[in-house]
């Protein structure tokens, strides 16, 4: 956030959650946990998120053959415009989690297990969008 002076941070917090769900609904539960209170995901959108889970599955398969844990990072952002104040607020949620050997084991057991219990953590930021600062930064980028 330091590198985006046009976004004046008004709130920042880390949230921790535990997902306890059936193996069949794990992907939906993971999306819901990460995006809860951030955006509502229509049920039709879950199919569009398959590529995200394909990347995570690839990371899990890679982790199974190496000794180091693999980091996964998800960046989500939404903007809200207030016509009354003519301001734009930016909401950012960054989710980072590690693909560990334990996750590899859970992934292997998915076909034989009936439930999954997983911990996740994410950072949530709220910022006021400053159009003047953005204009200056935009000119420098160009």
Image (tube, grey):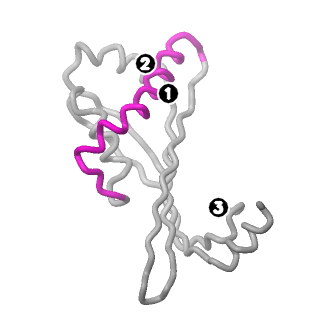
In the rendered structure, does residue 55 fall within the stretch colored magenta?
yes
User: In the displayed structure, would residue 142 be above or below residue 82?
Assistant: above
For the residues labelled 3 and 2, the Cα–Cα distance comes to 33 Å
For the residues labelled 1 and 2, the Cα–Cα distance comes to 7 Å
94 on left or right of 7 = left
Task: Identify the element where label 3 is drawn.
Answer: loop
Most foreground residue, 79 or 116: 79
Picture disc at residue 104: 2
Q: Which residue is label 1 attached to? A: 99
Q: For the residues carrying marks 1 and 3, which lies nearer the camera in this image? A: 3
Identify the residue at horizontal 40%, vertical 30% (top origin).
53
Q: Are marks 3 and 2 in contact (CB under 8 Å)?
A: no
Q: Are marks 1 and 2 in contact (CB under 8 Å)?
A: yes
Q: Which residue is label 3 attached to? A: 1
Q: For the residues carrying marks 3 and 2, which lies nearer the camera in this image? A: 3
22 on left or right of 134 = left
Q: Earlier in the sequence, mark 1 or mark 3?
A: 3
Most foreground residue, 115 or 27: 27
Identify the residue at horizontal 42%, vertical 26% (top origin).
54
Q: Position of residue 2 (x, y in %)?
A: 70, 63
Magenta segment's dominant SS is helix
Q: Residues within 10 Å of mark 2 (few under 14, many from 20)?
A: some
Q: Position of residue 28 (x, y in %)?
A: 27, 38
User: In the displayed structure, would residue 22 be above or below residue 133?
Assistant: above
Q: Earlier in the sequence, mark 3 or mark 2?
A: 3
Q: Which residues are magenta?
A: 39-67
30 on left or right of 60 = left
Task: Identify the element where label 1 is drawn.
Answer: strand
For the residues labelled 1 and 3, the Cα–Cα distance comes to 25 Å
Identify the residue at horizontal 57%, vertical 27% (top origin).
70
Q: Residue furthest right?
A: 140
């Amino acid at each position: 956030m330091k590198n985006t002076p046009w976004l004046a941070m008004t709130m920042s917090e880390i949230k921790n959650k535990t997902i306890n769900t059936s193996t069949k609904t794990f992907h939906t539960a993971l999306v819901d946990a990460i995006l809860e209170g951030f955006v509502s995901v229509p049920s039709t959108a879950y199919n569009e998120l398959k590529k995200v889970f394909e990347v995570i599955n690839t990371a899990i398969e890679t982790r199974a053959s190496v000794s180091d844990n693999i980091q996964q990072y998800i960046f989500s952002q939404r903007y809200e415009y207030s016509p009354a104040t003519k301001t734009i607020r930016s909401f950012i949620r960054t989710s980072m989690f590690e693909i560990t050997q334990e996750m590899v084991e859970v992934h292997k057991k998915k076909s034989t297990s009936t439930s999954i219990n997983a911990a996740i953590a994410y950072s949530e930021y709220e910022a006021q969008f400053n159009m003047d600062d953005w204009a200056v930064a935009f000119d420098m980028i160009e």
